[in-house]
Image (spheres, rainbow, N blue to C red):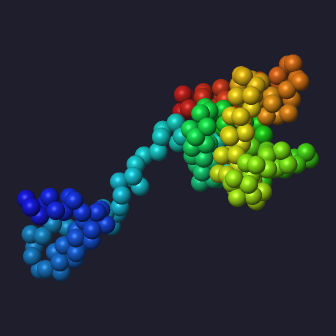
């Protein structure tokens, strides 16, 4: 019992080392009653094998098919959007909808106006945020671009007072009384929600 308590108090790597050594000793012995060794991943942290959020998994598959994005890249973008949304207090479906409308999930998209990356950020208007993320080169990093874009969108929503007005502000179309950009983003958000609910 004392050994078990001591073992529980030790770090996971120490426990894995002890289990590994015991397995080697057992395999080396000629005892037929020795249980078979554990699989190679038995000492890996449990979180490595935790299933992804089912909604995120559906979004990855949906976005990968719809926008012809590699699965691993789609997964990285979805995870980054969820993380950035949580950090700034926005809906991840909204952030993903903005990415869909702005760049079609193309991380190297660039507009004639100088907007760059997944969320089409115009560097000259956001120098303060870019400096905080390591400079203008960060704009081409998908995770940094999503984090920056989500922060900018959150600031615009806060300034404008509503999500619709914040979206219009984000697009530089605050004067558009028909709010076409906001309507497109919200329609895309609905498509993402439908994909998850149906998936």
Residue 131 appearing in the image? yes
The outermost residue toward the top is 177
Question: Disc count in the image?
Answer: 0
Task: Residue 120 in the image: state x and y as whole percent.
Answer: 79, 44
- 54 w.r.t. 9: above or below: above
Residues 19 and 10: in front is 10
Q: In which quarter of the image is residue 196?
A: top right
Residue found 15% across the figure and 66% down from its top:
35
Quarter in which the C terminus is drawn = top right
Task: Residue 59 in the image: state x and y as whole percent.
Answer: 58, 39
The outermost residue toward the right is 112
Q: Is residue 64 left or right of residue 104?
A: left
- 58 w.r.t. 9: above or below: above
Residue 78 appearing in the image? no
Residue found 82% across the figure and 49% down from its top:
123
Residue found 70% across the figure and 46% down from its top:
148
Q: Is residue 125 left or right of residue 40?
A: right
Q: In this view, does 92 lie to the left or right of 186?
A: left
Residues 13 and 97: in front is 13
Quarter in which the N terminus is drawn = bottom left
Task: Residue 23 in the image: state x and y as whole percent.
Answer: 21, 72
Task: Residue 67 in the image: state x and y as whole percent.
Answer: 71, 44
């Amino acid at each position: 019992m004392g050994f078990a308590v001591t073992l529980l108090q030790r770090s996971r790597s120490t426990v894995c080392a002890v289990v590994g050594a015991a397995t080697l000793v057992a395999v080396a012995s000629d005892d037929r009653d020795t249980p078979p060794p554990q699989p190679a991943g038995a000492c890996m942290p449990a979180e490595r094998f935790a299933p992804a959020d089912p909604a995120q998994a559906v979004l990855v598959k949906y976005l990968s098919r719809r926008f012809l994005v590699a699965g691993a890249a789609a997964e990285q973008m979805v995870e980054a959007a969820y993380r950035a949304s949580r950090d700034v207090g926005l809906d991840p479906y909204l952030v993903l909808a903005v990415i869909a409308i702005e760049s079609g999930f193309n991380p190297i998209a660039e507009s004639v106006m100088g907007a760059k990356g997944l969320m089409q950020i115009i560097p000259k208007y956001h120098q303060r945020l870019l400096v905080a993320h390591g400079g203008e080169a960060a704009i081409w990093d998908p995770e940094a671009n999503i984090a920056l874009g989500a922060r900018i969108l959150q600031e615009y929503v806060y300034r404008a007072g509503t999500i619709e007005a914040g979206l219009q502000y984000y697009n530089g179309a605050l004067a558009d009384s028909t709010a076409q950009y906001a309507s497109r983003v919200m329609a895309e958000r609905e498509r993402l929600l439908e994909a998850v609910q149906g998936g």
